[in-house]
Amino acid sequence: MSERPIWAPWRIEYITGPKDGECIFCAAASSNNTDPAHTPIDRTDHCLTILNAYPYAPAHVMVAPVRHVGALEDLTSEEMLDTMRLARRSILAIGKAMTPDGFNVGFNLGKVAGAGIADHLHLHVVPRWSGDTNFMPVLADTNVIPQALEATREVLLEGLAGTGDL
């Protein structure tokens, strides 16, 4: 099969951008930024949820402790519990707002396991739909995200409003 380029402009910023700047999770924890990729959509005293700026699927979010910590075994009990609480709230909100058929939820622990940001632990919550693997990733290892981050943020904020207390 011959390789044919497919235009995926949202990826170039990540590919060519600096990787040694401020941690995105620490920036989100301390910022009043209005950029949807760097503003928490949900938060507790110990953890926060942000949209993945380079998502695998629409509404792909990441839950991370506020404290800069890289290892699961270094989390406090409160951080562990809040990570799972926010993951559950994300699943409820995404389920309500976007009706996926399932979810991938998990940690990539270490660079060799696929962690793009290995020094700040984070949990991925990725909604999945039946048939969401189409010709794009099969032929070109490229995914098409049909919704802008701003629109995804609004839909998830509406969904979070109905999930109740932790």
Image (tube, rainbow, N blue to C red):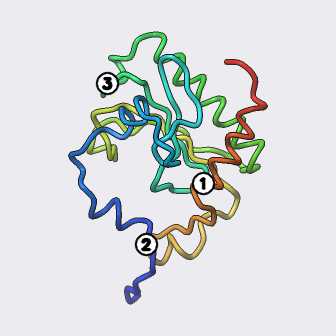
The quadrant of the rendering that contains the N terminus is bottom left
Vertical comparison of 92 with 131: above or below: above
Q: Nearer the viewer, mark 3 or mark 2?
A: 2
CB under 8 Å between discs 2 and 1: no
Three-letter code for the amino acid on which mark 2 is drawn: Pro
Number of other residues with Cα within 10 Å of mark 1, as a class: few under 14, some 14 to 19, many 20 or more: few
* Element marked by disc 1: helix
* Element marked by disc 2: helix
Report how far apart the C-alphas of labels 3 and 2 lie in the structure.
Answer: 31 Å
Report how far apart the C-alphas of labels 1 and 3 lie in the structure.
Answer: 28 Å
Vertical comparison of 99 with 76: above or below: below
Which of the numbered marks, if any, corresponds to residue 69? Answer: 3
Which of the numbered marks, if any, corresponds to residue 9? Answer: 2
Q: Is residue 72 left or right of residue 132?
A: left
Report x, y in % for residue 35: 49, 48
Three-letter code for the amino acid on which mark 1 is drawn: Glu
Number of other residues with Cα within 10 Å of mark 2, as a class: few under 14, some 14 to 19, many 20 or more: few
